[in-house]
Image (cartoon, grey):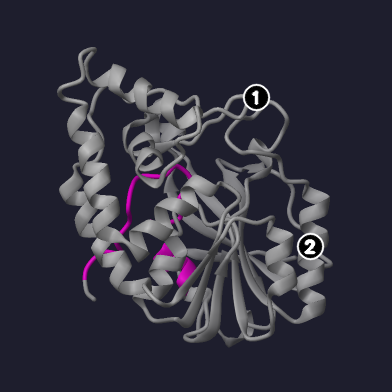
Amino acid sequence: MNGKTPHIVQYQGSKRLLAPQILQYMPRKVNRFIEPFSGMAAITIAAAKESRASEYHVNDINKPIIRILQTAIGAPDELIKKYTAIWTRQFSHPGGHLEHFYYIRNRFNEGEQTAENMLYLLARCVKGSVRYGRNGNFNQSPDKRRHGTNPKNIANNVYAISSLLKGKVVFTSLDYRQIFDAARQGDLIYLDPPYQGVTNAKDNRYFSGLSYDEFAKSITYLDKKGIDYIISYDGECGGRAYGSDLPSSLNCVKFLLNAGTSTQATLLGKRSTTFESLYVSKRIAPAMEFIPEQLTLTER
């Protein structure tokens, strides 16, 4: 399959644009590729496009997100039909397209957490950004400037993703540590956990925070099991680091991945480059034929 890597919908925090760089650190072939904090599974999709594994395991604690992926891959016609119906009804809603968004959001929060409802909310909400209130309800607002991703575009991407992964992927919605327990040698785990700046009690993007100490302890567990991993975790911009490095005791090498010019800095009249930290198991890092020019190795 040629061309760009398909994606279902815009999703804030997605590593889709960085996938070509991240995959340069992945072995050419692994037994099973596992993504415990999948979001919209950008790296899994990119890996499948290059046939990097024979099996894939996609996991996210956010069950409606997993429902989107599971339906897109297993029943693409169903997802496209139902999303099209919801998307089309916004143009005939008595209160207008914005009221239609709030109507679907209310139904979602009242229990109708279907794949098509979640997909519509993501397609219409501000920046494709998932936000939840303290009561657990989805509370992100609609983007008033647009009507969400056109169903035709959704369809093209959904069919492409389904062709890549159908019959090759297992879906779960479990705590990441349960995924670690089931991992075995020959697997490769790609981790894109909630970053340190968004896991405090005041942040509502995630269902729960991620303890730095607990996460580091879990990576030590992978080291002891001999499981290979790649981790996207915080970074720096304009010389300012976001979050602490993972412990130097871990059996991995840290690289800084050039993620481009910071949008926020540009809005403030500055020009700063954002670098994402990428931690790679030492077992697979030496196998790299070269260090890509856009990535900088840092001393641990």
Residue 89 percent coordinates (x, y): 20, 29
Which amino acid lies under the numbered mark 1 shown in the image of this protein?
Answer: Arg
The residue to which callout 1 is attached is 134
The residue to which callout 2 is attached is 218
**Residue 247 in view:** no
Q: Earlier in the sequence, mark 2 or mark 1?
A: 1
Residue 163 lies in the magenta-colored region: no
Q: Residue at x 38, y 29 (%)?
A: 126
The magenta stretch spans which residues? 3-23
Q: Residue at x 40, y 51 (%)?
A: 68
What is the quadrant of the N terminus in the image?
A: bottom left
Which is more toward the observer, 90 or 147? 90
Residue 72 percent coordinates (x, y): 34, 58
Q: Residue at x 39, y 37 (%)?
A: 128
Residue 78 percent coordinates (x, y): 27, 54
Q: Which secondary structure type mostly characterizes the magenta part of the structure?
A: loop
Q: Secondary structure at mark 2?
A: helix
